[in-house]
Amino acid sequence: MSKSPLPTYAIVELLIRLTQYNASIGDYKGHAPYDNNVIVKTSTGTIVFPEKLILKQFESPEAIAEAELTAAAAGFNPSA
């Protein structure tokens, strides 16, 4: 992970965007960096974002391709 912390609101914005593809993702509860990824805990499960995707959401959200959003939503793991 980069030396500066990732903006939490960019993660929340990504979660909101992903509900278009998977309505069961849930609300942001917390996150933890892992290698070049970020593990995000939601009210209904977990999802892993590449750090680059969060930074893209922060810097230039319109540059995120629909395929990237679809792939991220597909990686959601609901709680058992």
Image (spheres, rainbow, N blue to C red):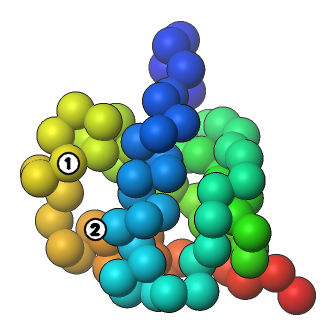
> Which residue extends farthest left?
63
Q: Depth-wise, is mark 1 or mark 2 nearer the camera?
A: 1
Question: x and y percent of residue 59 in the render?
Answer: 22, 32
**On-image quarter of the N terminus:** top right
With 10 as the anchor, is 65 left or right in this view? left
Q: Which residue is mark 2?
A: 68
Which numbered dot is residue 61? 1
What residue is drawn where x is 42% and y is 65%?
A: 16
- Residue 36 image point, x, y percent: 53, 39
Picture residue at 58% right of the left edge, 60% below the top:
48
* Residue 18 locus on image (x, y percent): 40, 72
Q: Secondary structure at mark 2?
A: helix
**Residue 4: percent from left, percent from top:** 50, 13
Question: Height in image: 2 above or below 29?
Answer: above
Q: Is residue 6 left or right of residue 43?
A: left
Q: Secondary structure at mark 1?
A: helix
Left or right relative to 48: residue 42:
right
The reply to whether discs 1 and 2 touch (Cβ–Cβ < 8 Å) is no
50 to 60, vertically: above or below: below
Please, is residue 33 above or below residue 73 in the view? above
Circle count: 2
Report crowding for label 2: few under 14, some 14 to 19, many 20 or more residues within 10 A (C-alpha): few
**Kind of residue indicated by mark 2:** Glu
For image coordinates 22% across by 75% down, the residue present is 67
Q: Is residue 79 above or below residue 39?
A: below
- Residue 51's disc number: none
Quadrant location, the C terminus = bottom right
Residue 78: name its quadrant: bottom right
Quick one: 65 or 8, which is closer to the camera? 8
For badge 1, the amino acid type reads: Pro
Q: Using the rendered image of the protein, determine whether residue 50 is visible from the camera's viewpoint.
A: no
